[in-house]
Image (cartoon, rainbow, N blue to C red):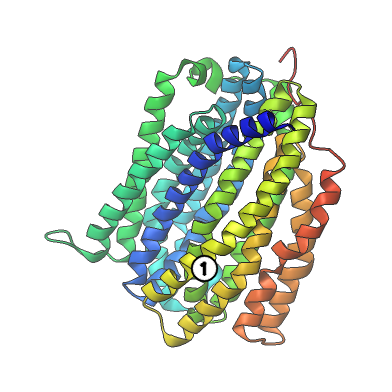
Amino acid sequence: MNTEEKRYFNKELMTLAIPLALQNLLNALVGASDALMLGRLTQNAIAAVSLANQISFVMSLFNGAMIGAVSVLIAQYWGKKDYINARRFLGMAVRYVAVISFIFFLLAFAIPEKLMAIFTPEYELIRIGAQYLRIVSFSYMFAGISQCFLMMMKVTNHAKMSVWISAVIVIVDMTVDLFLIYGIGPVPALGANGSAYSTIAVEVIALIWCLIWVRKKENVRLDRSTVFFFSKTHEKDVWGIIPGMLASSLSWGLSITVHSFILGHLGTDATAAASVTSVAQQLIQCLAHGLSSGAGIMIAQKLGQNMLEKAKDYGKRFWRVAFLNGLGNICLIAIVGPFVYLFYVLEPQAKSYLLQMIIFNVVYMFAFAYNTIITCGVFPAGGDSKYDAISVFFATWCFAIPLSLLGCFVFHWPVMVVYVVMCLDEIVKVPFIRRRYNRYLWLRNLTRENA
């Protein structure tokens, strides 16, 4: 790659990555604003809401696998300028996501107490979390469908629009949270339930905005012929990618849920500290997610145009990007860590855990950059979605999770030892990525000439 090509690569990456990173940051700020305001309320409130949100998190894993698989094909067809098939795959995503979201809505609305009891035995956390869950479940349908359209904005080079939507959502969420959580003027203080109502409000706004945008853009506009389009060929192409993405998504995501289960049984101090640490992680991870999405879109579009050598050059370039992002994550930990430590109202023991967790995350977040950009960005761009599932299975489910469960329930290790063991999976995966990359299983054009 010569100097001119590197300049073009950097320009293209920044055009995609910066808006995508900003959108991820703004999305993280929605959750962070809830956590920040609840953190000033009571320790039980933030712990209960954090556990309750594991349900929407699991739902996002299923939706994310479907949307991720479809986005690969849309990106390749969009690079090929085949807009009809790009719209057909968008319609397919909307259908599947609507069904998944409705199932999770029914579960969260009908049996919230039973769902909360999975994560914690403490009655007060179950009570607060169940009330929150029954209310917030109404946001699931809106959130799922709007994510399909936000994905389309990213893939079709309209990422700036998703940033505007996310920016408005943050402002609305923080404003409504302030009124409903604490109560201002005639508005009653609803505590954790106020956060649930604000979530519904922002998801409704996001979906309405997305529908207006889709209506105005001819190349992405949905109609009856695209929403209800069915083809065995299209289904086969999508389901060739979904199993790997779903296995990866569920393996990783359910491990986070198991983390919550373990920490919930280590006590409220550990749960609260881990919840606050998670907020810091989500804020810092935004850039890696933006770069990963940018990598996937850039490489997929080149593959759709059958420019395999150019896609290979892009893949090489993203190794350097991942290293620089890892260094950036370390700097961000140094900035965000002290802020979250000083801001939250936590018990002394919880604050001690929080400080130690932040220090450990210096190493964790460096490894996260490689796993996200290469494994979740470069590889899936050409349909290689299996490796992430394999690496998560061995590193997480055969190593980190069994060892941390034994440490918690059998050996009764200290809280911080259990926490570090749970997070080792991201670190042990790094040395094996290069070997998979060099097999070039990700260097494939997935489009069909007669689709």
User: Which residue is pictured at 43% across the width and 70% down the height?
Assistant: 340
Q: Label 1: which residue?
A: 334
Q: Provide residue 136's location: percent of width, then percent of height.
A: 39, 54
- Image quarter where the N terminus lies is top right
- Image quarter where the C terminus lies is top right
Task: Determine the image quadrant of residue 316.
Answer: top right
Kind of element beneath mark 1: helix
Q: Residue furthest left?
A: 186
Q: Provide residue 283's location: percent of width, then percent of height.
A: 49, 57
Q: Provide residue 190's location: percent of width, then percent of height.
A: 26, 64
Q: Visible in this render: residue 240?
A: no
Q: Is residue 66 left or right of residue 149?
A: right
Task: Determine the image quadrant of residue 129.
Answer: bottom left
Q: Is residue 99 left or right of residue 322?
A: left
Q: Residue furthest front?
A: 3
For label 1, the crowd category at 10 Å Cα-Cα, with few meaning under 14, some 14 to 19 and many 20 or more, is few
Front position in the image: 195 or 296? 296
User: Which residue is pictured at 74% across the width and 39% down the height?
Assistant: 315
